[in-house]
Image: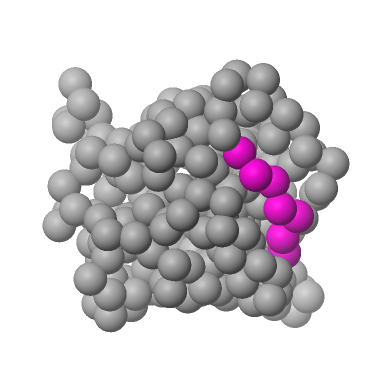
Amino acid sequence: MDSATAVVTGASRGIGEQIAHAVAGAGAHTAICARDAEALERVEADIRDAGGSVTAIRTDVRDEYDVERLVETAMREGGAIQYVVANAGVYHGTAGETPLTEESYTAFDDHIRTNARGVFSTIREAVPHLGPDARIVVPTGVVAREGMPGYGSYAVSKAAAEAIARGFAADLDTPVGAVDPGQVATDLSGDGGRDPVSVAEMVLWALRDADPSALDGGVLDWGDYRSATR
């Protein structure tokens, strides 16, 4: 990834933070964003201390003008964008304990705005700035494809995010796909899952090494990753 430019949204914690570290550690100039400016600055400092090249831009992916500024800054500072990870997401409530029958309209709307529309705005605004051989990855989960009780509109929003990735894959020459690492131990999804560091390595594989035809319009899961890297 040396001399490449990458954009990672939702990079202030959890999977996004570790993805930002992994991508910057692989040599890319990495533009990171999140709504929490203080947490984002901490991640930026940590990446710099580790020798990485990084720019932190406080961004709300629900606001397309914020996202436009993010990708334009990334392009200006690092050149054409080669890697995009549309990771920013929210979960209102406790994972597995938010059934649709009890979902508030406020939670429903913000899940869609952040987890689906935010993916749309990230990819759409990045398109004019993509370089040759660019790749776009959208982290997802099994709740997007299987009916699981208690995941409410979060699951709906992740299904929409996958559909957005498939739509862009159909409309672009650039490979666009989803990556499903299974359950991950984060503040968003709760305890008992995979270490975000190992998940970041999976995303790095999808960006750099995975078969682009398998990524494009598809969902690469943990089994795909392990089979390819064992």
In the image: residue 97, left or right of residue 226:
right
Q: Where is residue 120 in the image (x, y as percent from the top left)?
A: 50, 74
Q: How many labels does the image show?
A: 0
Image quadrant holding the N terminus, namely: top left
Which residue lies at the image location 72% right of the left edge and 60% below the top edge? 59
Magenta: main secondary structure: strand
Q: Position of residue 42 (x, y in %)?
A: 77, 32
Q: Is residue 150 above or below residue 2?
A: below
Q: Position of residue 92 (x, y in %)?
A: 73, 58
Question: Foreground: 124 or 54?
Answer: 54
Tell me if residue 177 can be seen: no
- Colour scheme in the image? one colour
Question: Foreground: 158 or 20?
Answer: 20
Per the image, is 7 magenta? no
Find the magenta span and give its range: 54-60
Which residue lies at the image location 27% right of the left edge and 65% below the top edge? 174
Which residue lies at the image location 52% right of the left edge and 59% below the top edge? 75
Q: Where is residue 194 in the image (x, y as percent from the top left)?
A: 48, 28
Question: Foreground: 61 or 154?
Answer: 61
Q: Is residue 28 above or below residue 83?
A: above
Per the image, is 58 magenta? yes
Image quadrant holding the C terminus, namely: top left
Task: Give the quarter of the image for residue 91.
Answer: bottom right
In the image: residue 158, left or right of residue 108:
left
Which residue lies at the image location 65% right of the left edge and 44% below the top edge? 55
In the image: residue 166, left or right of residue 120:
left
Tell me if residue 81 can be seen: yes
Residue sitting at the far right: 38
